[in-house]
Amino acid sequence: MPLSPMIGLIKLFPYDFAPAGWIFCHGQDVPIDESKDLYEMIEFTFGGGGDKFRMPDLRQVAPPNCHYCVASKGTNVTFDGALGETFLKPEYYMPSNLMKCSGQSLDKSKYADLERHIGTRFGGGPTSFKLPDLQPKNPDYLSYVMTVIGWNPELIDGYLGELRLLPFELSRTDYQVLCDGRGPWYRQVQPELYNLLGSRFGGNDREFYLPDLRSSAPSQFNYYMNIQAAPPPKS
């Protein structure tokens, strides 16, 4: 995940705070003057009025002790992300390297890098493959979108503890690990990660566990967590 994301993208975070440049999707009203760029994207789609606009409310679909947040700062024209990484996004301008996950067929020769990672796990044939159809899971006024052209997802980017939703398994797991409740991890060995997660997903003041997000990910998707990166800045 680039440190300067596309304004309006929505991600799941395992923190008890929204990182700087992100806002909780808790259905709260936000002053327009504080987030003008985001307001220009979504306006009053989710409610509000006057000098405030409302964030989408995704509390009911977020796993325990995790929060969906929307990017309020970054770019509003282009997107630079990991190949296959999947997000929620409001209905507005779509960069050419992002596509809705609506079960459409893609040409293998045009999207060869993505096809090498996901193959025909969502369907396809000799010359084409399909993206997953996540439309039934779309919250109101939001869509799941996938990065169809991007950088190698095996490379690390983003914040410590940051989650990435991918439609395949990673082969390199020294920087990113599957969120399957694994542990225990030890506070003395990973003090910064412990400071972010604490024992909210299990553990005590000496050891901790990663969240188990297997049942929260769409079918054939996986949540991975960055375990080697800089901690996220707080607002």
Image: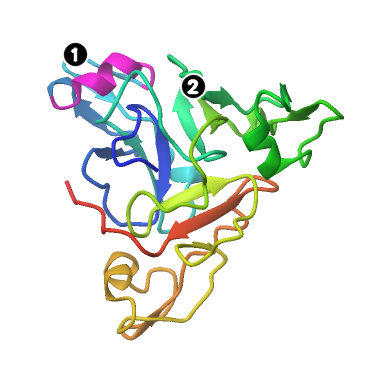
Most common SS among magenta residues: helix
Name the residue beneath numbered marker 1.
50
For the residues labelled 1 and 2, the Cα–Cα distance comes to 21 Å
Q: Residue furthest right?
A: 126
**Residue 151 placed where, x, y %?**
48, 39
Tell which circle, 1 or 2, labels the residue nearer the N-terminal end: 1
**Going by the image, does 100 lie left or right of 191?**
right
Residue 125, visible in the rendered structure = yes
143 or 74: nearer the viewer: 74
Picture layout, residue 140 above or below residue 226: above
Q: Does the magenta portion include 59? A: no
Picture layout, residue 11 above or below residue 205: above
Picture layout, residue 97 above or below residue 194: above
Given the image, on which type of amino acid does mark 2 rest? Answer: Tyr
**Going by the image, does 36 lie left or right of 106?**
left
Q: Please, what secondary structure does the residue beneath circle 2 have?
A: loop
Few, some or many residues within 10 Å of mark 1 (<14, 14–19, 20+): few
User: Residue at the spot x=44%, y=36% of the render?
Assistant: 81
Numbered badge on residue 141: 2
Residue stretch rendered in magenta on the structure: 34-46
Q: Please, what secondary structure does the residue beneath circle 1 have?
A: loop
**Residue 169 placed where, x, y %?**
64, 54
